[in-house]
Amino acid sequence: MAAILYESLNSREEKLDVGLDWHDEPEIIYFKNGHYKLMLNLKEYDITDECFCIVNAGVIRKLESLDEKGVEYSIKLDLNELCFQKETDPVNEALLYPLKNGTIKFSEFITVSDFGFLQILRSFNDMVRRYREFGTKGTTDTVSVRKFVLESVSDQLMVKADLLHIIALIDSFGMVQDKEDVDAEKQVRAIKDSINYIREHYREKLYIRNLSELTGLNEQYFIRFFGSVTGVSPLDYINRYRVEQASKLLRDTDTHVYEIAEECGFHNIGNFIKIFRSVTGETPHKFRKQFGKED
């Protein structure tokens, strides 16, 4: 099991900014201090106090730090790895399988006033200390975020035990509940479907009407709705995603710039350079030079 712990340390130069996305596994986020704006399935939360947030599997989330200071940790719960080998194990049947299948879910927030918070915090901090003392530290694409990975089998076993202990505490304090059908489910599905479509077809010509038809929403309403959730228009999101993919190719390959542009859905090199500069602040050629590559 190679669970990764992420640690975010905000500074004046770099603040945590996690774009809109979702995962197939639940994620535990611990806000130690700082000020954050968090969105979960289209609902926004203002985080100013120490707390845990558990992002259930499939939940759309977006996270932004609003403070120059702040410490935050996150780790995903791979329920496939945590389930016991014997399928009929009572813990599997009563808790882990239903969590994995989405028929029950974790409470979204555990605050300092909740009964059991201190016990959960103690177990979580023990796990963080293990990562910091024995883990291999690495960097991420965000300067303020670093990751820790435990290499030895014994340490990985310890973390597996830590995570199961945390899940047991959460359940014992009544913080697991039946999944409810919410009014926003259709809108959440519309956002997921449109973003997945963009990610799968960004190399092709994309039209807003295709996205609105896919989601079953009126085109003008879809544009306003998409912007209110993601913070950018559908066209801007498409361009940013294309630039993100182009950046990876510029960094990792020797493919010519004009070929990368076309591969990422830009069929006009001048338009590609203009949009790339507007998103990254520099031209594709200048961006590539940072990695010792020439076109």
Image (cartoon, rainbow, N blue to C red):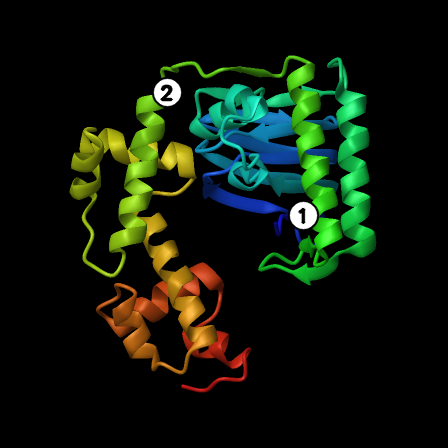
Kind of residue indicated by mark 1? Leu
Q: Position of residue 164 (x, y in %)?
A: 67, 32
Q: Is residue 173 above or below residue 8?
A: above
The correct choice, above or below, for 192 with respect to 240 in the image is above
Which label sits on residue 280? none
Describe the element under mark 1 as helix, strand or loop. Answer: strand
Identify the residue position indicated by label 2 in the image. Answer: 184
Q: Callout 1 environment at 10 Å: few (<14), some (14 to 19), or many (20+)?
A: many
Task: Specify the farthest residue to the bottom.
Answer: 294
Mark 1 = which residue?
5
- Residue 97 in view: yes
Numbered disc 2: secondary structure: loop
Discs 2/1, front: 1
Which residue is at the front of the view, 287 or 177?
Answer: 177
Q: Quadrant of residue 167?
A: top right
Confirm whether residue 11 shows in the render: no
Between the C-alphas of marks 2 and 1, the distance is 31 Å
Residue at image location 57% in from the left, 34% down from the top: 84
Instruction: State the residue in front, 21 or 162.
Output: 162
Name the residue at 67% across, 41% down: 160
Where is residue 142 shown, x and y percent of the image? Answer: 61, 56
Mark 2 or mark 1, earlier in chain: 1
| Residue 120 horizontal/vertical position (percent) | 75, 26
Q: Residues within 10 Å of mark 2 (few under 14, many from 20)?
A: few
| Residue at (19% x, 29% y) in the render | 216
* Residue 83: quarter of image: top right
The image position of residue 128, as x and y in percent, is 77, 43
